[in-house]
Every structure is written in structure tokens, then in C-alpha cells.
Amino acid sequence: MINLSSAAINEIRRLKSKQPSTILFRLRVKSGGCGDWFYDLGFDTTVQATDQVVEFDDIRLVIDPGSLNYINGLSLDYAEDLMGGGFRFHNPQATSICSCGNSFSVSQ
């Protein structure tokens, strides 16, 4: 299961407000980055038959099954600091995290 903080929900809601009302929020894990994997957040218009859709208030989070294997238990937060705002990923499956915070490794 994935958890979104209220700050993350509010930021996604803000970003989504600039998109068509039917837009979906997608979370993917892709190969690459500073570690073996990196998080990819974006908007999408379609849900595939194998996707998992998790609802948080009015936010529909879409996750493909391959990504779900790497992010089960993930907590997504949003925070602002002197350098600006950004999403923060807290992944219990990550065995190492790059200093950028968006790239990670897992032991297989």
C-alpha cells in the first residue's frame, strides 16, 4: 500500500487543478538515476487493465504492477525549504538512497 501525506495530496491537487478534470496522477519506478531506480511522477489520461488505482480524497493515483513491486509501503510527502519545494519519498524497501532523494537501490 502507498501512503500520501496531506501536504502531498494538497500539492498534487494544486498541480492537477491546472490540468483537464479527467487527468490521473501516475507514479512509476524506472531504471536509472543515481541509484538503480528512480521515481517518476506525472499525469496520465489512461488506466491500463493491469494498473492499480488508489484513491486519496479526490486524487486517483495510478501505479503499474512492475513499479508496485518496488514501492509497496512507500510514503510520499511534500515539503518546502530554502531550496524550493519537492516531493519526498520514504521507501521501506530501499536499501540505499541517493542524496537527490529521487533515486534508490533495493536488494533482490
Image (cartoon, rainbow, N blue to C red):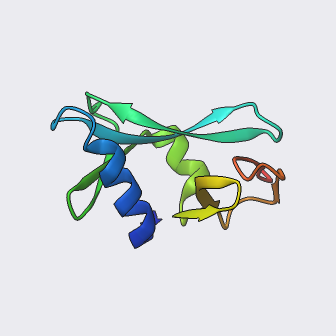
Q: Residue at x 76, y 52 (%)?
A: 106
Residue 83 placement, left or right of 1: right
Above/below status of 3 relative to 13: below
Q: Is residue 14 above or below residue 38?
A: below
Seen from the viewer's position, the closer of residues 45 and 8 is 8
In the picture as drawn, the residue positioned furthest to the bottom comes out as 6
Residue 40 visible in the displayed image:
yes
Which residue shows up at 40% across the image and 56% down it? 11
Residue farthest along the front direction in this orientation: 82
Residue pictured at 30% horizontal, 53% vertical: 13
Asked whether the viewer can see residue 75, the reply is no
Q: Is residue 48 left or right of residue 105?
A: left
Q: Is residue 45 left or right of residue 37?
A: left
Image point 67% across, 67% down: which residue?
92
Q: Quadrant of the N terminus?
A: bottom left
Residue 53 percent location from the top left of the image: 29, 49
* Image coords of residue 15 (percent x, y): 36, 44
The location of residue 64, given as percent across then percent down, is 43, 39
Q: Quadrant of residue 36?
A: top right
On screen, residue 57 versus residue 54, left or right, reads left
Q: How many marks?
A: 0
